[in-house]
Image: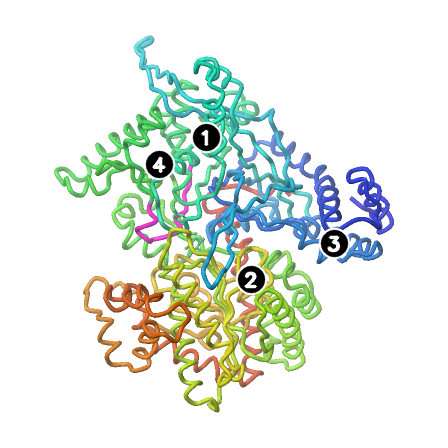
């Protein structure tokens, strides 16, 4: 730790000289970033070692959060703030001629996730460490993270994200902790002393090498670990080499195929795609993680594996790591020699599971043939779990074949991963109240009847340290000036702001901060999109993955409608708006990519039409990512959360916006419902069908999108625009969107909710004119956002699911 600015400056200059052979006068921002990153990591090392040693010596339970995705973003700012060295470093660098904010920009995002699920995992790690809780992440060190998005000619183009090009300052490679993961081959069964033994033979071995990243708690001396596994070929490859007739090229190909296992993150967000490489990735993560946990456990508790559930929790982030179940069983049965009954009891009491979606296309089902071939022993175990479980079902529901086969883990030649997760875990949770209710009453209804005690809700949260303290320092200081700094450790205390919601002096200060943040974002937009936006306009933002159910289409239809109104009547009195979009589409998701093109096409037309007189601007920000979100959230006035009710499990962007004073314009879906309960209906703009209404329309099949098209001339005009030749791209560019609405009957009720959405926008427009009212709404949102801190969420996981306690 640096004890003074002078101390920092001296150490920093010395390091720059020794590591990069540069003097301070020659150093670039990137040199400063690398040097500073190294120093900060070294500074947290002592606490990291102490925390790890404490966990090794102390016998308290620890949790491992298994996730295929950790969307960490940048770490320099968090690590500096959390280790309490911000002021010294900022001042020191300033004296050396550098601006710390610019240095942050040098860091490449660790984009090891797609969206909500991966970012949630990152927020959870921050809260675990900040609450001194013994919880660690276990993931994959993908060589390529989520693709980089470029917009060329209005279309999304994907480029590889080689985030490791310039070495990653936060990681420590630990080859001594590497483990072997086995794929393929066959299983030999032999009977020894009337007991069956299983010998896996002729397999391919992959070496899993861990790279540890410190997770620094907020000014509290706790540093937990995010362990990311990388696939490498191992020495035994030599056998391959010699047994394959010295075929060097073949050998290199084989090596490459092994390294490919941790080669890239699958860019699919919410659609399951049964690719063999993805299955390999899942087993690779799970096997490496569980082996290393068991090794550590045995070193600490000798061999009493019956104690495992009291000492270790394994949490699975959606079904992607669900193979932890058969893998743990395999180790307990085959390597540790436990009986099936003991192994099963231990496993069931160790694993807990979160579901993150009800979209049926996202539910993972792996073909039996694929699993059998790639993971022969794992398949046998899943089969045995299924058989025993089906026998129990038979006792409960004799002769009810249909019911039993619907509930089975294996059916129609597939393994249903969600079923396996529910049956073999002790806790199943949804991520917002409505989502958990839908799981209990609809998607997982029969399982809820079987195991009511397993189901519980844990409404998502976000770390207020990153999403308020770090990204919006002026708002954070204003809050501290007003109510003191206890909210940083106890975010619920933000409610103390409520009494200032109507205080005009405070309102003016909040407005001033928002104005400055908007100016900053406006500069970014000018620089990156070449568009000048009016900072007095309402910044109306929808940033998230592109998906039909999230209904970016509803938003852009409304913009086209506003454009029609304004172009017909340029003098109409509307509050100027800047509509900002951002988000990536999965590379194979044709429809989502068309929506990106449509947004950009509308932007081209609207932004340059003189009749609009700058009252409307449309901006699509390229490459939405954690670091871009950090620039957007503080500057937003309106947060668009407009999914078809019942479809968005929770949403977490909604919480980030709210915390920064944006007002939600949303449907009663996911966590919007809880946000509206907290702030009250006067402080949110709600519209659209409710979840029950949506579900009813689906089941009754009475909805006819074409009827709305025929009756509502505004909608007709908007849709016809898609088939006309006003928009760049020509007549056939948007026909798929047009037909998805009219021929495929508008699966997500865009037309049905259009009128109500327009009304809500009218209200936004009117309300914004009354700045006092608007600011009071904005402050009320900030004041209630503490409930959506991931500290609250993690506290609930810790006490209600995992049973772990803080170390201080
Ligand atoms: C296997 C393909 C696949 C990939 C990702 C299937 C499913 C997913 C995720 C479950 C999708 C996801 O990110 N879900 C989001 O999780 C967030 C955190 O809980 C929620 O806030 C979002 O509502 C939910 O869509």
Cβ atoms at labels 3 and 4 below 8 Å apart: no
Disc 2: which residue? 786
What SS does tag 3 mark?
helix
Q: Residue furthest top?
A: 193
Q: Earlier in the sequence, mark 3 or mark 1?
A: 3
Q: Is residue 768 above or below residue 674?
A: below
* Residues at marks 2 and 4, CA–CA distance in whole angstroms: 34 Å
What is the span of residues highlighted in magenta in the rendered image? 351-363
* Residues at marks 3 and 2, CA–CA distance in whole angstroms: 24 Å
Residue at 41 percent of width and 43 percent of height: 353
| Left or right, 445 with reference to 378 | left
What SS does tag 4 mark?
loop
Q: Earlier in the sequence, mark 1 or mark 4?
A: 1
Q: Nearer the viewer, mark 3 or mark 4?
A: 3
Q: Which mark is residue 257?
A: 1
Disc 4: which residue? 424
Disc 3: which residue? 86
Label 4 crowd bin: few (<14), some (14–19), many (20+), radius 10 Å: many
Q: Position of residue 199 (x, y in %)?
A: 37, 16
**Where is residue 201, by image quadrant?**
top left
Residue at 54 percent of width and 70 percent of height: 662
């Amino acid at each position: 730790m640096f004890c003074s600015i002078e101390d920092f400056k001296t150490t920093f200059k010395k390091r720059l000289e020794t590591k990069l052979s540069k003097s301070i006068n020659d150093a670039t921002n990137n040199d400063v970033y690398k040097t500073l990153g190294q120093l900060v990591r070294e500074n947290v090392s002592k606490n990291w070692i102490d925390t790890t040693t404490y966990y090794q010596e102390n016998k308290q339970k620890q949790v491992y959060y298994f996730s295929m995705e950790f969307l960490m973003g940048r770490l320099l700012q968090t690590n500096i703030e959390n280790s309490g060295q911000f002021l010294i470093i900022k001042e020191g660098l300033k004296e050396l001629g550098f601006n710390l904010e610019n240095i942050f920009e040098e860091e490449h995002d660790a984009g090891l996730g797609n969206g909500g699920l991966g970012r949630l995992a990152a927020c959870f790690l921050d809260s675990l460490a900040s609450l001194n809780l013994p919880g660690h992440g276990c993931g994959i060190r993908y060589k390529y993270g989520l693709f980089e998005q470029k917009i060329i000619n209005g279309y999304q183009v994907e480029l590889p994200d080689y985030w490791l090009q310039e070495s990653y300052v936060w990681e420590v490679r630990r080859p001594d902790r590497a483990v072997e993961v086995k794929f393929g081959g066959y299983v030999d069964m032999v009977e020894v002393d009337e007991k069956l033994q299983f010998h896996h033979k002729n397999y391919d071995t992959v070496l899993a090498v861990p790279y540890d990243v410190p997770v620094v708690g907020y000014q509290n001396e706790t540093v937990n670990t995010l362990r990311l596994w990388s696939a490498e070929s191992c020495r035994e490859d030599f056998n391959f080499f010699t047994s394959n007739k010295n075929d060097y090229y073949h050998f290199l190909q084989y090596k490459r195929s092994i390294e490919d296992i941790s080669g890239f993150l699958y860019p699919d967000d919410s659609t399951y795609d049964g690719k063999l490489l993805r299955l390999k990735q899942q087993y690779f993560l799970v096997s490496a993680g569980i082996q290393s946990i068991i090794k550590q456990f045995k070193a600490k508790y000798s061999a009493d594996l019956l104690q495992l559930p009291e000492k270790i929790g394994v949490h699975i982030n959606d079904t992607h790591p669900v193979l932890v179940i058969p893998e743990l069983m395999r180790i307990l049965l085959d390597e540790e020699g436990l009986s099936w009954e003991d192994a099963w009891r231990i496993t069931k009491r160790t694993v807990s599971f979160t579901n993150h979606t009800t979209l049926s296309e996202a539910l993972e089902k792996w073909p039996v043939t694929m699993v059998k071939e790639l993971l022969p022993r794992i398949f046998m175990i899943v089969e045995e779990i299924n058989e025993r479980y089906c026998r129990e079902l038979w006792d409960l529901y004799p002769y009810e074949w249909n019911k039993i086969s619907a509930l089975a883990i294996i059916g129609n030649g597939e393994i249903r991963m969600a079923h396996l997760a529910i049956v073999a875990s002790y806790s199943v949770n949804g991520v917002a109240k409505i989502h958990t209710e839908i799981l209990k009453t609809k998607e997982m209804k029969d399982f809820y009847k079987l195991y009511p005690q397993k189901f519980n809700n844990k409404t998502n949260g976000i770390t207020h340290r990153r999403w308020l303290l770090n990204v919006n320092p002026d708002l954070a200081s204003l809050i501290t000036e007003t109510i003191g700094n206890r909210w940083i450790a106890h975010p619920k205390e933000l409610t103390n702001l409520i009494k200032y919601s109507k205080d005009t002096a405070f309102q003016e200060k909040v407005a001033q901060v928002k104005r400055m943040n908007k100016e900053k974002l406006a500069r970014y937009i000018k620089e990156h999109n070449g568009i000048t936006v009016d900072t007095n306009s309402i910044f109306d933002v929808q940033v998230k993955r592109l998906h039909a159910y999230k209904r970016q289409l509803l938003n852009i239809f409304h913009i086209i409608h506003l454009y029609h109104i304004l172009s017909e009547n340029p003098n109409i009195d509307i509050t100027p708006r800047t509509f900002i979009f951002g988000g990536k589409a999965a590379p194979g998701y044709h429809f989502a990519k068309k929506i990106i093109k449509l947004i950009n096409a509308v932007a081209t037309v609207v932004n340059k039409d003189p009749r609009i007189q700058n009252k409307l601007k449309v901006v699509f920000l390229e490459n939405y990512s954690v670091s871009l979100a950090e620039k957007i959230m503080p500057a937003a006035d309106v947060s668009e959360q407009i999914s078809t009710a019942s479809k968005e499990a929770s949403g977490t962007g909604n919480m980030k916006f709210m915390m920064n004073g944006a007002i939600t314009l949303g449907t009663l879906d996911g966590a919007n419902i809880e946000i509206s309960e907290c702030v009250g209906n006067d402080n949110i703009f709600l519209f659209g069908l409710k979840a029950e209404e949506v579900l009813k329309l689906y089941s009754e099949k009475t909805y006819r999108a074409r009827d709305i098209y025929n009756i509502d001339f505004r909608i007709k005009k908007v849709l016809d625009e898609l088939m006309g030749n006003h928009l760049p791209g020509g007549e056939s560019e948007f026909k798929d969107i047009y037909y998805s609405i009219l021929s495929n009957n508008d699966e997500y009720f865009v037309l049905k909710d259009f009128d109500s959405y327009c009304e809500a926008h009218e209200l936004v427009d009117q309300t914004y004119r009354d700045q006092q009212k608007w600011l009071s709404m904005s402050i009320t949102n900030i004041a209630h956002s503490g409930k959506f801190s991931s500290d609250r969420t993690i506290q609930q996981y810790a006490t209600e699911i995992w049973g772990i306690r803080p170390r201080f």
